[in-house]
Amino acid sequence: MIFWKRVQQAINDLWYLRSVTVGKPVETQELANRIARESTVSPADTHAVLRALPAIMADFMKESRAIHLEGLGWFRYTTVSAGNGVATKDEVSSDQITGLRVQFTPDRTRNMSGGYTRALIADEGVSFMEWLGKPDDETQIPDDEDGDEGVTENPLG
């Protein structure tokens, strides 16, 4: 069941639907335990692989390579640039880069109706229900200090 709630935007005073995550986030160990139950790998081995994955992915991406996890999707770095651009090609330099983001693009597969289904999106069995709980019951996912998820500290200076 996917929960949603009604949210009024301050900028235009209009109401929108927003998805809500509830409960505790699924942590690495819980993922490892589930994967181990569905494979021949022990929970400890699975957990070790999952813990190593982010650093190894970052090492490859630092070489300007994209990462493709089959059935999941693609990960790559994108840059955040300062300012509004420059007038000439010669003025473009790495000094304009203020940070990095990780871009994720989910894999997609053709479904029976001829359309596409994105990875992590269930083909069937998804239902939606309005969230009537308290805001305190929602999952709190940490943001960066400026509230811009996905932006890393500037590793360039």
Image (cartoon, rainbow, N blue to C red):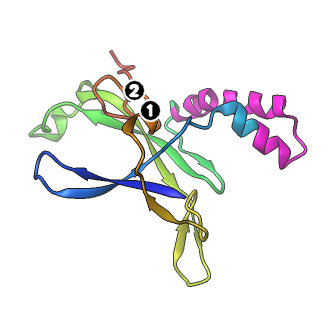
Q: Name the foreground residue: 28 vs 140.
A: 140
Q: Secondary structure at mark 2?
A: loop
The image shows residue 104 at horizontal and vertical percentages of 48, 47
Q: Name the foreground residue: 128 vs 50.
A: 128
The image shows residue 123 at horizontal and vertical percentages of 59, 70
> Image height check: is 74 above or below 47?
below
The residue carrying mark 2 is 152
**Quarter location, residue 154:** top left
- The quadrant of the rendering that contains the C terminus is top left
Answer few, some or many: residues within 10 Å of disc 2's Cα (few below 14, many 20 plus, some between 14 and 19).
some
| Labels 2 and 1: the sequence-earlier one | 1
Give the amino acid at mark 2: Thr
Count of all numbered marks drawn on residues in the image: 2
> Image height check: is 72 above or below 49?
below
The image shows residue 87 at horizontal and vertical percentages of 8, 40
Bounds of the magenta span?
Answer: 33-61
Distance CA(mark 2)–CA(mark 1): 19 Å
> Image height check: is 36 above or below 127?
above
The answer to whether the residues at label 2 and label 1 have Cβ atoms under 8 Å apart is no
The residue carrying mark 1 is 140
**Quarter location, residue 109:** bottom right
Q: Residue at x 11, y 47 (%)?
A: 11
- The quadrant of the rendering that contains the N terminus is bottom right
The question of residue 16 being in magenta is answered with no
Give the amino acid at mark 1: Gln
| 1 on left or right of 35 | left
Answer few, some or many: residues within 10 Å of disc 1's Cα (few below 14, many 20 plus, some between 14 and 19).
few
Toward the top, the furthest residue is 157
Q: Name the foreground residue: 90 vs 95.
A: 95
